[in-house]
């Protein structure tokens, strides 16, 4: 038998209504406001009626979500974390976590993976947003994975276990990546130099011959060449779970399925030659040869050096480090 209490004269809600509202996920502060009583009184009603209490800061509210999702690594968690790094947002004013994308299908898949029933919101620019209210999820993203509310320029690469890196990169690619099969180009864009530099380094470790460029307020990482892009696609979609279908379909235009039979394109050979010239330039520059002497040696125009310094951050850093 349920035990209620004698009703407070100024209370505008019945005790049964208070208990029902709390069990449906409403906060005690909001119940108190609507009942015209103190939160202390609401807590007393709940306690005396032996209502099971929700953990502080993780009440069910109107919508549900697996608030602990980002505590445990999995292929799909890594993907969603990468997607969030590209197209996510943490509010600095309240406990909300947002994912935005023009393609609602991938947001529906992410929503299902997070065990959420939050609705998607469509704005006037045809962008869909999944808004999740969760203090636990917000602080897990910030404290475990280093996300911030101003991550556009301060984003840093999270500490990702090796087995989950391809899934994280696929998530980021689906958010802020681009592939053009005809031009044989894959690119990533971001506002954080630290994040993009680390991404470039991780891709280079896997022999994808990526390059990092500064582009006004943004940084871009490029992968080029038919064979390289084919190998990148094989890595990116290994053990695939979540992915954006329309981007995968561009990669799937490749008709040759044997990497050894895919010819290298002319642009790839040119880039390799330029890369070798840069290495030669830096080697000779370390030997205290002047820029003019080196340009004559490797047969390039001095203006080319200025272009390299402007567009190739790695070259510039090594050049500047030579005393």
Image: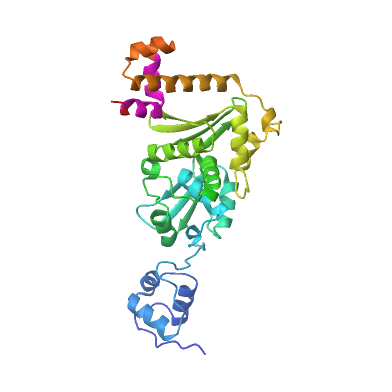
Q: Nearer the viewer, residue 289 or 219?
A: 289
Work out whether 72 lies above or below 312. below
Magenta highlight on residue 161: no
Point out residue 230 in the picture as x, y percentages from the top left corner.
Answer: 63, 33
Residue 54 in percent (x, y) is at 45, 73
- Residue 307 or 22: which is nearer the viewer? 307
Write down the quadrant of residue 314 in the picture.
Answer: top left
Give the residue at x 35% y 20%: 285
Q: Position of residue 142 (x, y in %)?
A: 39, 54
Can you see residue 215?
no
Please check the rendered image and state whether residue 307 is part of the magenta-colored stretch, yes or no.
yes
Residue 150 at x, y percent in the picture: 36, 45
Up the image or down, 305 lies above or below 5; here it is above
27 w.r.t. 277: above or below: below
Q: Residue at x 38, y 32 (%)?
A: 217
Residue range of the region highlighted in magenta in the rendering: 304-320
Q: How is the image coloured?
A: rainbow
Q: Is residue 125 left or right of residue 293?
A: right
Give the side of residue 231 with respect to residue 149, left or right.
Answer: right
Magenta part, dominant SS: helix
Which residue appears farthest toward the bottom when viewing the image?
A: 1
């Amino acid at each position: 038998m349920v035990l209620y209490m004698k009703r407070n004269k100024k209370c505008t809600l019945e005790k049964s209504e208070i208990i029902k509202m709390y069990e449906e996920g409403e906060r005690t502060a909001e119940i108190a406001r609507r009942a015209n009583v103190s939160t202390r009184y609401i807590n007393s009603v709940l306690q005396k009626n032996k209502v099971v209490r929700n953990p502080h800061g993780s009440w069910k509210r109107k919508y549900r979500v697996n608030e602990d999702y980002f505590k445990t690594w999995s292929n799909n968690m890594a993907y969603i974390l990468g997607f969030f790094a590209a197209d996510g947002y943490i509010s600095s004013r309240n406990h909300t976590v947002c994912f935005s994308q023009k393609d609602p299908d991938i947001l529906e898949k992410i929503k299902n993976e997070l065990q959420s029933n939050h609705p998607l919101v469509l704005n006037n620019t045809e962008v869909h947003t999944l808004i999740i209210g969760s203090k636990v999820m917000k602080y897990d993203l910030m404290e475990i994975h280093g996300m911030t509310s101003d991550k556009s320029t301060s984003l840093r690469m999270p500490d990702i276990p090796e087995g989950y890196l391809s899934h994280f990169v696929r998530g980021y690619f689906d958010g802020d990546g681009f592939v053009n099969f005809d031009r044989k180009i894959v690119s990533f864009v971001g506002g954080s130099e630290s994040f993009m530099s680390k991404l470039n380094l991780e891709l280079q470790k896997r022999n994808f011959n990526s390059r990092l460029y500064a582009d006004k307020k943004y940084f871009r990482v490029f992968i080029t060449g038919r064979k390289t892009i084919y190998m990148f696609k094989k890595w990116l979609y290994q053990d695939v779970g979540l992915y954006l279908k329309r981007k995968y379909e561009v990669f799937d235009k490749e008709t040759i399925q044997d990497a050894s039979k895919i010819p290298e394109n002319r642009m790839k050979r040119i880039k390799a030659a330029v890369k070798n010239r840069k290495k030669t330039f830096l080697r000779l520059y370390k030997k205290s040869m002047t820029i003019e002497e080196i340009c004559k040696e490797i047969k390039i125009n001095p203006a080319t050096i200025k272009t390299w310094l402007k567009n190739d951050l790695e070259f510039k850093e090594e050049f500047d480090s030579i005393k």
